[in-house]
Image: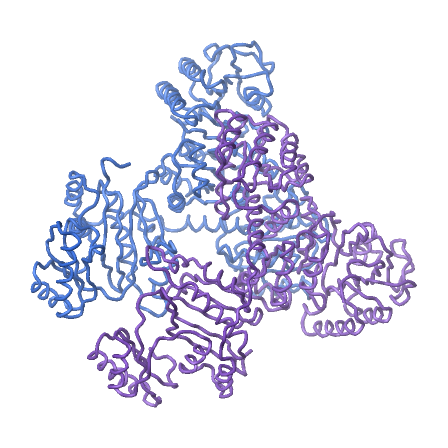
Chain colours: A blue, B purple
Amino acid sequence: MTLEHVFRPRSVAVVGASDNPSKLGWSVLHNIVTYGFRGRVYPVNPGREYVHCIPCYASVRDIPGDVDLAVVVVPARYVEQVFLDCAEKGVRGAVVITAGFKEIGPQGEELERRILKIARDAGMRFVGPNCMGIINTDEDVSLNATFAPTQPLRGSIGFISQSGAMGVAVLDFSNAERIGFSKFASMGNKADVSGNDLVEMFGRDPNTKVILMYIENFGNPRNFITIARKVSESKPIIAVKSGRTKAGAAAASSHTGAIAGEDAGAQALFKQCGVLRALTIEEMFNYAEAFAAQRLPRGKRVAVLTNGGGPGIIAADAVEGHGLEMAGFQKSTVEALRSVLPREASVRNPVDMIAGATASTYRSCLSILLKDRNVDAVLVINVPLGKETELETAAAIAEASRFTGKPVLACLFGRKESSEGVRHLIEHGIPTYRFPEGAVRALAAMWRYRSWREKPKGRTVRFRAGREEAQRILDGAMSRDREWLTKREVDHLLELYGFRLPKGMVATTEDEAVRIAKKLNYPVVMKVVSDDIIHKWDVGGVALDIKGETELRRQYRRIMSNVQKKRPGARVDGIRVERMITGGREVILGMKHDSIYGSMIMFGLGGIYVETFRDVSFRISPLTDVDAQEMVEEIRGYQLLAGARGEKPCDIKRLKNYVLRLNQMVTELQGIREMDLNPVIALPKGAVVVDARVRLEQHGSQ
Amino acid sequence: MTLEHVFRPRSVAVVGASDNPSKLGWSVLHNIVTYGFRGRVYPVNPGREYVHCIPCYASVRDIPGDVDLAVVVVPARYVEQVFLDCAEKGVRGAVVITAGFKEIGPQGEELERRILKIARDAGMRFVGPNCMGIINTDEDVSLNATFAPTQPLRGSIGFISQSGAMGVAVLDFSNAERIGFSKFASMGNKADVSGNDLVEMFGRDPNTKVILMYIENFGNPRNFITIARKVSESKPIIAVKSGRTKAGAAAASSHTGAIAGEDAGAQALFKQCGVLRALTIEEMFNYAEAFAAQRLPRGKRVAVLTNGGGPGIIAADAVEGHGLEMAGFQKSTVEALRSVLPREASVRNPVDMIAGATASTYRSCLSILLKDRNVDAVLVINVPLGKETELETAAAIAEASRFTGKPVLACLFGRKESSEGVRHLIEHGIPTYRFPEGAVRALAAMWRYRSWREKPKGRTVRFRAGREEAQRILDGAMSRDREWLTKREVDHLLELYGFRLPKGMVATTEDEAVRIAKKLNYPVVMKVVSDDIIHKWDVGGVALDIKGETELRRQYRRIMSNVQKKRPGARVDGIRVERMITGGREVILGMKHDSIYGSMIMFGLGGIYVETFRDVSFRISPLTDVDAQEMVEEIRGYQLLAGARGEKPCDIKRLKNYVLRLNQMVTELQGIREMDLNPVIALPKGAVVVDARVRLEQHGSQ
């Protein structure tokens, strides 16, 4: 079942159409008619013969011809009957604007379930309920089935909004900014048609060049990753995800009746599927304007052309601040600039043509810069110095940019969006901003997107592992309703998946411990072995850095007496003597089952700084090899692992390998709720899991 | 000498006035005349009898009456003569718009020096050269002595710009946004009148409520701290400082001919004097609108009132993200809201009145929220849902805010600045934004400013110290042209300033070392003592954690033989035996002499993470006790020092004390260029400087 009937209907019934301009049923019909829908429209309202001078029907069933789409604006209590009527009539799509469903509590939730069942049984797809409608600006459809007070401009942006109010606001805003849409959908409660369905559909839509999303929470994040990754390969998806902070998330859960996601999950998810995250609606549109109008830059070297020094410096700050580079020009460029510019001008980047610059100076300099092989994109800034009209300057910029393959963005500093220069530039495909920072931010997003698209896509890696035996360990522990695996179980599990543990053996007598230590070579470590003791440190059951036999014997006795004192009832199987790992760097690997995002894998620097600096990276499982590589390399502490300060680098390859092994464990085993490998000591060759904990899913939990 | 004659002249000569509208000399005269200057204006141009139908004079000397201010727009080569004429005429102030001075190189620099001398000798103050002029909108002055194409609106913002182009752009932008100015000055090359002079003057100006600055570099940062701190106590200063990044700084130095400052210095400077830093021009105006129109919030608890869920969530995210809090309402508030809102509305914060909200709903709910004792400020959001006109809603918001002492900010989501609702709100003193984030950011800046104003101002602390002896140590080393102090000199210096060093003594024989260690108690540390060896580690001259006599004797011999092998010629005075410091946290204290900002003091977490996480705080010396406190508390790792994870807290008081002692050293001693106390071990009681290096100023260097 596609969404063809919803977005490209040949006939639309407005169920709940009204003659009263204060009602939504009026606004929707009014918008459909005035926006010039190319098909037939049938108002439905049992009380009237005509609405808006159009013949009106008592029920969908009474409509003489076929109905592709029903737009429903009746009160919630009538919606079920309307759906039954639609099913009987054979209507294939619906948009339910009516509110009063899941978002108001259990009663509404039940009603939502019932209409979903009717739709499923009848093979009808529907958007909503509790939404503001949909728009398709395609010339052969021209459908505005919303109650928004603003009619959308035609363009190449597809917008999907989880908030109706945000949808209205955005239509209004984008009209002022002269931003055009191809399609728009307000998702509402997403009872049937989901955000994923819409992304997939907009992805296929030839009129949509850029997809924008306003999201408050995800229905099926793993599905989203798959779909969005595919779509992002051919067109950019830009998303604002709110509910980032605790307060925002609390508001989100009260707003949509869904559990709010943690931001780490959302952040990982966007990274994994190439979705560009914007932090504000304004930023999202900054990006969208650039993506819709311009090509992607081939590199990150930016030239800035300005008639005012200050704005040039601000732009240079922004270029570096956003991870781009100020281009260094070819010699011929500098010479050419010098020949057209006065002596006081600066021919270095940023090129400051100074106050006297005319439209023709802009034309010449911009052409020169676009020819430079070291320049991947140009930002043109104009300050209104009153010597030339704004329109002439705009025309010169547009003209010089015409036959280039490089992106050109403009900043008419401080100018209104209604000014003629801004209009001219936008109409000629030059995204134009009020301040240099907005333009640079957009350019940086384009570069980020291009880099994502060009990087190797990564593949799933599978290691030989003792999967069945590992599952038996987990099942055994779960069948006894345990929350944690014992140390021995954990070690066994890790060994089955190819992790290296410190060399060692369990001693049951002091003399045996001495023999083992001798074989291992000092220094050694000792740890009590007991399934009854999970937190060995707390009972004084550990001794580190034992350098000789005397110390070993003393510590052996100390551990035994500590344990007897603090845990008199515990069954002790002996003391494990291990080779002490010296040198290397502590890292942490972890996994957490998130109720929204599924298994989240974590990597970071270990030690006491983990919590303070939160220098960790997250991804949602399953991971590719490229994901694992990025996880290791994106933490700030990566330089320490890679051998900063003249030290030997750690075995980065092994760390990536461990991330992938962890990923494999959590994908193919059932029952792990949380897992910490902490610390893992990363050595110049190899890495050793010194301690680990595995928490199980419990029958009572979640 | 005040700037009275410059900003409140009764008569102005425009030297270089022109009849040709493409010349600056035309624009300046045109602006003065059309903006309605209240005094007399005298065009000066040797070639004409009238300019702009006003009688014209060949020279300033020929003007019959007194001249308070000369605005100079002649080419650079004539400026010196004009200054001589002005001096002869007794002109007291000048604004030099003409470019071609310091900014073009040595020749211009020389010319600038000459005109400065003429002015100083004649007691004349001047703004510029290479600037765009000044504005005073006071009704009894009404002077627009700039060549900007836009006439400024009257208001309460004073704006100081180091870039002329930025000045033009800002006037243009602010006109569109309906932001009014009290005074404006483009500083140009700051040959005479500096940014500090202007801040001081705008600080005293009763018509200026908020001071905005666009800065590229500081002339005298220490003076700026003093002046700005004083002014900030009564009115906010908001600054954009560009040249933040390397690229920006490079552009800045080419632009202004001044050395660019490092951003850490600027950041510290702003913190120390209460200046609010905005990162973009747009942000600066976001702040200014709020400060100019509203009172400061008494606390940081914000209520959000909205008719759309999405924008409410976005606002809640922003509130937390900017360090404010979402207010928890009083019970009576919740009840009152419940009584006026429909069942589907949310009466929790953010209050979502949902789509049906009318102007009267806004009025009631806003009044209710403003009465809540737990609410310090309200952000009102409106999405255009088409049921009520924008103006009615705006009027209701303005009305309900009228008699409150709490700040109210509005967001008419996505609306243009020219829309009637926005105009109405701004005219009624409600700062109004397009997106919730801008409003929240401004509110956060207001709260930050209020917190700064209310915090104790801090005082200078002076400890007893052996200043003279310390200076002798430095002088002695400098007289021998040394770059570094020896370990013994460093220790002595630190002791003279009350820093605690590890207990210990120098042994010259193995047996003596054993005796010292016994007295100190094991474990101990040994370090070779030699003025010829600065990097003891590199020559194997250190041994840590020595636990007994046997080990001590072995290590003693090892160190001696290492040193003999690696530094056969070095004079060795013995081996220092010190008590080993166990436990505690490593921190770093440092000082660096910066050519622009002077002595910069640094504090941070020590260890290998210093470089990776750069978790350090900076201040410019001299410091107050409050500065020291903030330096210690603002690093992210502060929680580790304060006893996170159930550990004993470090002696924070002592760390602050050490910061102040370091400050005292660098303020009263001459000759220190750089100093690192690293590591300093912060213990539960006290702190010990385990290692330190002091680098001296050299004759060849700075």
Residue A95 appears in the rendering: no
Report x, y in % for residue B359: 61, 28
Find residue A48 and report its image quarter. top right
The N terminus of chain B sits in image quarter = bottom right
The correct choice, above or below, for B109 with respect to A577 in the image is below
B543 vs B19, left or right, is left
- Residue occupying image coordinates x 33% and y 44%: A620
The correct choice, above or below, for A48 with respect to A104 in the image is above
A569 vs B90, left or right, is left
Q: Which one is nearer the viewer's eye here, A368 or A307?
A: A307
Q: Which one is nearer the viewer's eye here, B537 or B396?
A: B396
B355 vs B577, left or right, is right
Across the whole image, how many numbered discs are drawn on residues? 0
The C terminus of chain B sits in image quarter = bottom right
Report x, y in % for residue B585: 36, 64
Q: Which one is nearer the viewer's eye here, B139 or A657?
A: B139
Residue B581 appears in the rendering: yes
Report x, y in % for residue A525: 18, 63
Find residue A20 and report its image quarter. top right
The correct choice, above or below, for B551 with respect to A298 in the image is below
Report x, y in % for residue B613: 41, 61
A652 vs A513, left or right, is right
The correct choice, above or below, for A417 with respect to B133 in the image is above
